[in-house]
Amino acid sequence: MTQTIDIPLIGGRVALNVRVRDVATAKAAMEIAGGACLFGFLVREYSSVDAAVEAIQAVQASVDRISVGLGEGDPTQWRAALEVAVRTRPVHLNQPFACAGYSAGYLRGAGNQRTVVNALVNPGSTPGKVIIATGPAGREWGRRQGPTEVPAEEAMAYLRDASVFSVKLFPLRCREAVHHVRAVARAAASAGIPLIEPTGGITPDNLAIILEAALAEGVSVMPHLYGALLSGDGELDIQKFRRCVAIARTVTGKA
């Protein structure tokens, strides 16, 4: 079994995950990217599951490209995010590593074969090592005892066993970000995991090298570009988004 994200991809390999505040902006972004984009809604920003569902459905009725997120990888939001996904059937759901397999299986058991669930890992101290203790209890253990790092290949093997077919690498605000992306992409490709999601610290200025690192290893890639593409009023800056789409098209032309 494998699962791929069910939207058009730039060059058959790239989608962009961004934030929007209204339907008009979402439609404009869809047109620019040829549909190869998702719009992130972070459950931590809402007072309740009902409120998140209402906000998502208001956009989803016109633009069916929803990515349900936690909010800065907050593991305490995993169950709320799953509940939102059950009710909205989004294209994509973000989850901590330990919760991803359960969430994917729960959605499939509820008849949802569509939603791609990712699993969050943190970059380790060196490229090729990752931290998988990104769930609620695991993160607390890591804070007390120091996080345990595992080889990226081992983490991807666990995800393959759990039928999770996307890995999110966050945060990438580090000097060796591109090397971490390449190492995780290589491990994902070896395990038959088709999609990686580099997140955190990605801007139009470094997007090309992040995409090139992932694509060189044979996987598809969906970078999350949130704060870097927002204007002063918190809405997606369409010109910055247009630049990122152009970068993705250029890079996939080389890949």
Image: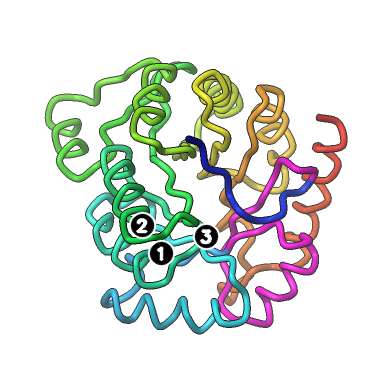
Which label's residue is closer to the chain start, 3 or 1?
Answer: 1
What amino acid type should be assigned to the residue bearing mark 3? Val
Which label's residue is closer to the chain start, 1 or 2?
Answer: 1
Which label's residue is closer to the chain start, 2 or 3?
Answer: 2
Neighbor class of circle 2 (other Cα within 10 Å; few <14, some 14-19, many 20+) is many
Q: Residue 21 is drawn in which quadrant?
A: bottom right
Q: Is residue 103 above or below residue 219?
A: below
Q: Residue at x 70, y 44 (%)?
A: 14
Give the CA distance from mark 1 to mark 2.
5 Å
The residue stretch that appears in magenta: 11-38
Which residue is under mark 2?
70
SS label for mark 2: loop
Per the rendering, the mark at residue 16 is none
Give the CA distance from mark 3 to mark 1.
14 Å
Residue 33 among magenta residues: yes
Per the rendering, the mark at residue 42 is 1
Which residue is under mark 3?
91
Q: Residue 79 is drawn in which quadrant?
A: bottom left
Q: Residue 255 is drawn in which quadrant?
A: top right
Residue 7, image x, y percentages: 65, 56
What amino acid type should be assigned to the residue bearing mark 2? Leu
